[in-house]
Every structure is written in C-alpha cells, then in structure tokens.
Image (tube, rainbow, N blue to C red):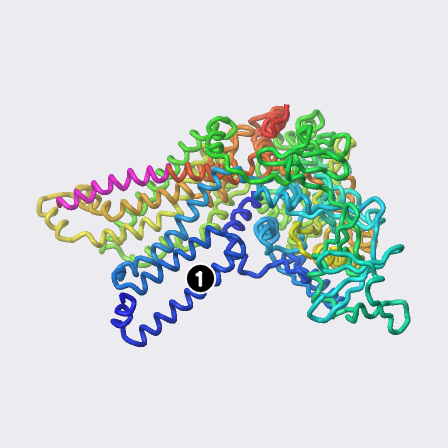
Amino acid sequence: MRKGISLLLSLTLTVGLASMGLASTPGVLTIWADDTRAPVFEALGEEYTAATGIPVEVFEIPFDDIRGELATAGPVGEGPDIIIGAHDWVGELAADGHLMELELPAGLAEEFDPATLEAFSQVGPLYGIPYAREGIALVYNKGLIEEAPETWDELVAFAREFTNPGVPQYGFVVQNPDPYHSFPFISALGGYIFGFDEDGVMDPCDVGLDNEGAITGVEYMVELFEEGLLPAGIGYDEWLGLFEEGRIAMAITGPWAVPSMQAAGQEVGVAPIPLIEGQRPLPLMGVQGVMVSAYTENPALVEDFLFEYFVTQDAMLAMYEQDPRPPAYFPAADAIVDDPILEGFIAATEGATPMPGIPEMAAVWGAWTDAMELIGLGELSAEEGLTQAADDIRDTLDCE
Amino acid sequence: MTRLSGLLRTSAPQAVLKIAGLGVLDALALFWCILFVAQGNWLFLGLVSGGTLVLNVLALSRKSYPFRYLAPGWLFLILMVVYPMGYNVYISVTNYATGHYHHKEDAIKLITRREFTPPSPLSFSLAAFGTERELYAVLLEGEERRYVAFPDGTLSDPEEHELVDEDGDGRIDELDGRARLQGPALTPHLGQLQAIRIPYERGWLRMATLREFRKRLPQYVYDEERDVMVDQRTGMEYAAAEDRFIGPEGERLDPGWRVYVGLENYARFFADPRYHGAFLRVMGWTFAFAILSVAFSFALGLALANLLNDSQLRFRKLYRSLLIIPYALPAVISILIWRGFYNVELGLFNQILSNTFNITVPWLRNPFWARFSIILTNVWLTYPYMLLVSLGALQSIPGELYEAARVDGAGGWQRFRNITFPLLMITVAPLLIGSFAISFNNFTLIWLLTEGRPAVEVGARAGSTDILLSYAYRLAFEGARGNEWSMAAALSIMIFVIVIIVSGVSFLRTKALEDISGGL
C-alpha cells in the first residue's frame, strides 16, 4: 500500500529528479541506499576509490522510494548502477525490465544461505545478492514470563492466566488484520500462499491459503479472539506502546520492534513461535540485498565492486553492525557470537519460505486482509474467510 | 518598428533590464531546445520553443501589452492543470501498468541486452594503451589467443602491430608507440572500455572485471523481419503480440510494452464486476461523507461564529484562539491521534464509556460507527475553517439591517434567518462548494483513519469507508498484477467529471443567490 504512494510521488518527482544529478555515469559507480545502509556503502566506496581510483557516489534515498525512483530515473539514463532493496521488489522491477540478471562467480553460491538466493530468484534468474534475512518470531518480556513456551497449549494457558483487558494487559498479541503477521498460523499445518511447479518456479494459480492446514491453523487464532485473549483488531503502534509499558508478555513481531522495547527498559527475549500440534509455525522470510539496474553503463565496475568488496566478511559484518539482521553470507553469520536476540530470530526463521515477490502478490494482500479482518470480527469462520479469499485471488489472476 | 517603439517608450535602465532578462530566458530556452532535439523529445521542443516565442512577442510588442500580466497565469495554468490533465487522459487510453512500462523499441533493447556466460567460459586479461586523453587499443591475452582490440569493436592480429616489452618482464609496455595505461591513468577510460562490444563467434567479448574481458552470449536475438524474439539457449521463439512477446505455449517474456488501447480501460471498468461492483455503493458514501462533513462543520462553525460575534461575550479572543487549534495542528498527526482514541480495547473513548456507562462502542470495527467516526473527525478538523470564514462574513453584514429589523419587531431567530443567513451565503457558498470538493477527495483522512475498512466482504475491492479516490487507489495498486496505472487514470478522470458536474451545478445555484442579493 505504502509502495503505491511512493510510486505516485516518484512519478511527480520525475522532473525534479532529473535535475538532482543522480546520473549513472560511465566510469563512476552510483549507488542508491537508504539512511541506514548508506554509511556502509560510503565507507566501502571510499575503500574502493582508494584502491582503484574509481569514484563511487552514494545517494541516500528513503527505502520506500528507491524502487519507484529506479523505474523513473533509470530508463532516462539518470538512475543508479546499484540499489539496495528487498527481495519482494524483484517481481515488479523485473517485469518492467529494470533489473540486470546476475551470475555468481563459481563456488560463491555455496557461501550463501540457499533460501536467500532462492528469494532473489523467484521469477527465474538471480536478480540480487542477498545480505540479510528477516522474519518474525515470538518476542517476549522476560520480566513477565521467564521462558518462552514450547507449545501452543502452554502459550494459551499462560495467556488465560495473565490476560485482563480491563487493566489492560495481554499475555499474547499479534497484529490483525495483517496477513504478514498472521502467516505463521497459515503455515504451521501446511498452508502456503503460492505453490511451485515441478521446475521450482512459483505458480500463482496454486493458491494454498484455503487448504485444510491453513484453515485449522487460523482456527487456533479464532479461539483466542473468541475467548477474548486477543484483541480482534490491533495495530503495531497500539500494542507496541503497551509492550513498552510492560503490559504485554508475548508478541509475534520482527527485529524492528526490539530496539524501542529495550529503550523502554524491558528485558526482551526472542524465540521460535510455539509448536502448534507439534508443527513449527514459520513466518514469511524477507531478504535484503543489492540489485543492479538494467540501465547501468558500468557492468564491469559493478561486478568488480560487488564481488571483490561487497561480498566479503568485513563488508557483510559492517552491514550487520548498521542493521542487525541475520546475515545471508555464511562467513559473516558464523563470525557473530553472543547476540541472543539475533540467534532467536535465526532460530525462528530457520526453514521459512521467502515471501512471494511476484507482481501477482498485489492481488493477494487485499483479499487476504479482508478475510483476516472479517474472521477477527467473527463475521466469517476461518474456513469461509480463507476460502473466499483464495477464490477471489484465483479469480483475479484468471486461474481456472 | 513595433519592437523599437516598445523599447523607446520605457526608460533606459528598464529597457536594459528587460532585454537582459529576455536574453537570459531565451538562452535558457535555446539550451533546453538543443537538449530536447538531442533526446528527440518533439512535444517538449514544440511547447518550449512556442512558449518562448509567445513570451518574446508579449514582452516586445506594444499591442500585446495587457496580456503581459495574464501570461504568467496562463503559463502556470498550462503547467499545473492542463499538462497533468492531458497526461492523465493520455495514460488512461494506454495499457500502462506493471509489465507495460516501456515503449516497444526500448523493451526490445532491454531484452536483447541480456547475456550469459557460455558453458565453456573464455576470458582474456586486458591491457589498455593510449594517452591520458585518448584510448588507443586494448591488448587481450587469452590462454591460446592474443588480439589487439580497438574501441570501435574491431579485432586485429598482434603480429600487425608493434609490441614493445621494454624491461623484458613478459608484460607489454608499449603498443604502436602508445604507453600502457595503469591505475589512475586507466580510470578516465573506464566508461569507454565498458562500452566496447567485440563481436566474437556467436556472442561478444566485453569487459567483465577491471582485469578481464570475457565472452558472453546473447540470451535473446531479435528477428526484425518476423518480429520474433529467439531464446538462444532453448531455441524457443517468442512472437510479438499486441503488447508483449509470447511463446508458443503462452509463456510471457518480460518486459512488455505500452500501446494505445483507446477506451478499453473505461470499457473494462464497466464490463467487469470486479471493478465496478462497488462503484455505486462507494459513490453513495462519498457523497454522504462530503455533504455531511460540510453541513455539520459549517453548522458548528457558524454557530460558534455567531456566539463569538456577540460583543457581550467575555474572553472572546481566548475562545477564538482555542477554537482554531484543530486547524493549526497538522492533520496527519491529529488523524492518527483520533485513530488511537477510537481503538476498541485500548482507546480513550471506550475507556471513558466503559468506566462511566459500562458500554463499549465498536468504533472503527463496525461500518456504521466507522462512518460516524470519520465524519466526527472530519468535522473536528474542518469547523475552524468554517468558523473563520463565517466570522469574516458576519462582520461584513451592515449593522443597519439589524437595526431596521429590530424596529420592525423581528426576533433573534428571524433576524438570523432573514438577514444573516442569506447574506452570509453569498460570500460563503462558493467556499462551501470548495470544501465539498476537498472532502470528496480527502484521501488522507480515509487512508490514515480507517484505510477504507472495515471490509464489507472478502475481495470487494472497497471497504465500507472507502471513498471514490481511495477506491481508485485500491483498484490501481491492489488490483491484480502489480500496478495498474492506466486503470487508475481512467477512474480519476471519471471522478474528475463527477466533481466538475457537482461543482458546476452548485455554482449555477450560487449565481441565483447573488441575484437575490442584487435585489436587496
């Protein structure tokens, strides 16, 4: 949703951009990164310039704007050579031909977490070099619950004990309606968004949001709504405020929420989401990485810079320092010790599937959010809601 | 003659200033025009050169003197209103959407640029020769072969050139009398080096790293005669359909391209229930929202203005300042604060209600209450504007009218009904129409407060609080595959037409009001 706004903005900014001088210049390496990652690239760029004499220009652009501005500025020769971004941008950018296909030097693929490479290859060719993966986990307040529960029953038992909406205090919270955050309930017993055909290519007509596993999983969520243990509609800011005040014991959320919880003085632990019927509910994995513009006039510099300077233990660790997410590059991941929060998130996303990044996802979020909302309000059962959503998605994507 | 006389009439310094200003403007325009010619951007070339010509005539000719003051207005009208509208109309008659971003020739260029490393890779170490200013040639040394390559992509045999190894270390230091370029001396030539494509066997050699040229094969070759794209790895042929290349079994080759589709987007909107299904419901709510917002906020603003206009009231200035606060706060922030208030479990309103009366209201979770909340918040956001407008208008009503009415024995309500209100409407009515149009398209409020939710049914494309504009937004960006710009453009033009009709009719009725005042 937010991406649409930024696209609109970037369209209107076309003229302004052209005069900002963000040009892809032959012989000069141009990189677009957001404010968190730009410092790492600036440092790497200086190192590169010192060694080769090749100028590197790093432009700081808001994360949500990078994708739209590449589409606007790239084709007219004003774009970057390299952008930083998320793997789920690939589908849309590649559909419009904005990205260059990449080939890893022999042997390098083995040094990456395979799921992260897979995430950047969902539409076929490899379109990005991953550096970190992220996903949601069970984040708990150690002051309220000593250890994370192992099983769902334990979690519910604790929530029954602890929850008192009148105070208000909640044993367990997950954002709703927000399919990204409730996906673990879908995945636990075998639900999925899109399946894959025999070649391993994503098949948008194989929608798995309404299979038996998905429905049974969401019913576990419905029980919490019905018992009053979980607010039917709650947004990120609302529950985060309560967590910071020490009124929430456990929440399903991502690494981005942790710093403000810690700043508020809460002692935070991170663990995998408790087993439902003995199965691990896995989140959708997001992968961060760099992509190369199809309009680059510096293919050799790009390759040189990326494989000689970016894919190194030092650079990957520097990225981790700036933006603490599990590194996708094994030599960097192995070098990190004694970060229990990171280890928690790594454990929770072990084996998770990357979020589908194909353009068809635009059709998925709307209907799925509607379903989760109506299920939360008790107007539809889990089965009705999910079946309707999946049918609508198939219909929109013109599947039989 | 006209030019001279125009100049002579003004004083010398003014004329100099004018000529200088015009000179700068013309120079800039010429610069742009050269750029546009280089880019082949004929539309902008015409617009800028024509516009500059008009400006010059306006500035120099005496006859056009009065138009000089209108010209800037026209310019901005064209830039800010006519051009975006025209562009919007243009987009709405194309298939512009994800996958159809480029024009066909650009799409072909992008597809044919794709390459891959052959199964048996071939690489050459590179040594460049030349001067600081000019790249002369590149010596490519492979395991078996050696070539001298020139910047235009031609290869020649090293035997035909003079290669000198001065210090005898096996590295060539000079080629045809040009020195080997290394380190910083090579940097200025990197752009040119990377642009070299040397045709080689079925592919080409190109610079792949700072030290090497490598052989690459084209992944697709375009057969212009048959308008077919051939995959070099599989031999599969993608034939050009209307807006993309399509394989024998319907495989889509990205990217596609942008074509003119006429009124297809409009037709698709009316033919496909997925698009128009919710239109009438959404339009009904949009009108209700805009009308009720304006009506309530105007009523509240006017009532408060009447109170504040009463000279017997103490602390008027203080009240006035306090009442204007909602107007002074940034709406984006206050809307989010309201959203927090409405939260069912944790919000301020329900905490008060449940503690005092033991009731809970499902504020943003129930269609009726969500709509109620939106109007309540919008009234709070907009009444200060109405208050300010009404205060100004009230003060312009001549006091004699009230005295005369009092003499005739009219009471407070009669005075308000027969004097205040009709006279007020003359000044305020056009502003109310403006407020209506703003509310009609108040995307920010809806999106920040409810995002159009709660949902009516799964996949309805519009929630119970979506207005036309947010509905258009959803259709465009939550539609199907990526973004549907052209559909969004078509819808926004339909919305534009609706607003124009409503405003036009209302303005006609305001004219009628003015006639009343003329008779007074």
**In this orientation, which residue lies closer to the viewer: A151 or A116?**
A116
Q: Chain of mark 1?
A: B
In the rendered image, the quadrant that contains the C terminus of chain B is top left
The prevailing secondary structure element of the residues shown in magenta is helix
Image location (x, y in percent) of residue A278: 79, 32
**In this orientation, which residue lies closer to the viewer: A337 or B143?**
B143
Q: Is residue B509 left or right of residue B112?
A: left
- Neighbor class of circle 1 (other Cα within 10 Å; few <14, some 14-19, many 20+) is some
Residue holding disc 1: B29
| Residue type indicated by callout 1 | Ala
**In this orientation, which residue lies closer to the viewer: A346 or A167?**
A346
Residue in the image at 59% along x and 30% along y: A371
Image location (x, y in percent) of residue B222: 67, 41
Most distant residue in the front direction: B160
Residue A123 in the magenta stretch? The answer is: no
Can the viewer see residue B160?
A: yes
Q: Secondary structure at mark 1?
A: helix
Is B173 situated above or below B201? below
Q: State which quadrant residue B176 falls in.
A: bottom right
**In this orientation, which residue lies closer to the viewer: A56 or B283?**
A56
Q: State which quadrant residue B111 falls in.
A: top right
Residue in the image at 77% along x and 53% along y: B205
Image location (x, y in percent) of residue A289: 71, 50
Residue in the image at 81% along x and 70% along y: B174
Q: Is residue B333 left or right of residue B23?
A: right
Can the viewer see residue A220?
A: no
Image location (x, y in percent) of residue A292: 69, 51
In the rendered image, the quadrant that contains the N terminus of chain B is bottom left
Residue in the image at 76% along x and 47% along y: B203
Q: Is residue B285 left or right of residue A219?
A: left
Most distant residue in the bottom direction: B12
- The magenta-colored residue range is B498-519
